[in-house]
Image (cartoon, rainbow, N blue to C red):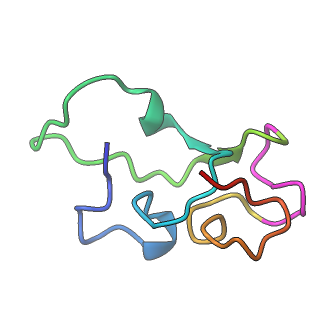
Amino acid sequence: MSEASDTNIDPRFDTTRPGLCSALHWKAQYIWADPDPTVPPATDGLFWCALTQTVLGPDGKLAEPGNCCSKDRTCHCGH
């Protein structure tokens, strides 16, 4: 389910970043199919926090991989 193999993806949307918060969700997580190299990756940047069910985390910051990979965030849920 890696979307980061496409070099055109903005690094802040890279869902393969190490240390991603387990509360961060995106729609590609729920697609239970093998990747099709003929179909472009879903890089729409639609992420949400499972703790708030919104695009903002409990700390009021945007929920996206670029922000949700740091244990410095007070709301970060480790693996």
Give the overall secondary structure of the magenta segment.
loop
Vertical relation: 33 (above or below) 46: above
Magenta residues, as a range?
53-61
* Residue 34 percent across, percent down from the top left: 19, 29
Q: Nearer the viewer, residue 79 or 1?
A: 79
Q: Is residue 55 magenta?
A: yes
Task: Kindly indicate the quadrant of the structure image that contains residue 4.
Answer: bottom left
* Residue 31 percent across, percent down from the top left: 38, 26
Residue farthest toward the left in the current orientation of the protein:
38
Vertical relation: 59 (above or below) 11: above
Q: Nearer the viewer, residue 75 or 79?
A: 79
- The residue located at (25%, 24%) in the rendering is 33
- The residue located at (23%, 61%) in the rendering is 5
Residue farthest toward the right in the current orientation of the protein:
59
- The residue located at (31%, 50%) in the rendering is 2
Q: Quadrant of the N terminus?
A: top left
User: Residue 73 vs residue 63: left or right?
Assistant: right
User: Residue 69 vs residue 60: left or right?
Assistant: left
Residue farthest toward the front in the current orientation of the protein:
79
User: Residue 54 vs residue 6: left or right?
Assistant: right
* Residue 23 percent across, percent down from the top left: 68, 45
- The residue located at (48%, 64%) in the rendering is 13
Vertical relation: 75 (above or below) 73: above
Q: Is residue 19 magenta?
A: no
Counting labels gives 0
User: Residue 44 vs residue 78: left or right?
Assistant: left
Q: Nearer the viewer, residue 33 or 75?
A: 75
* Residue 59 percent across, percent down from the top left: 90, 63
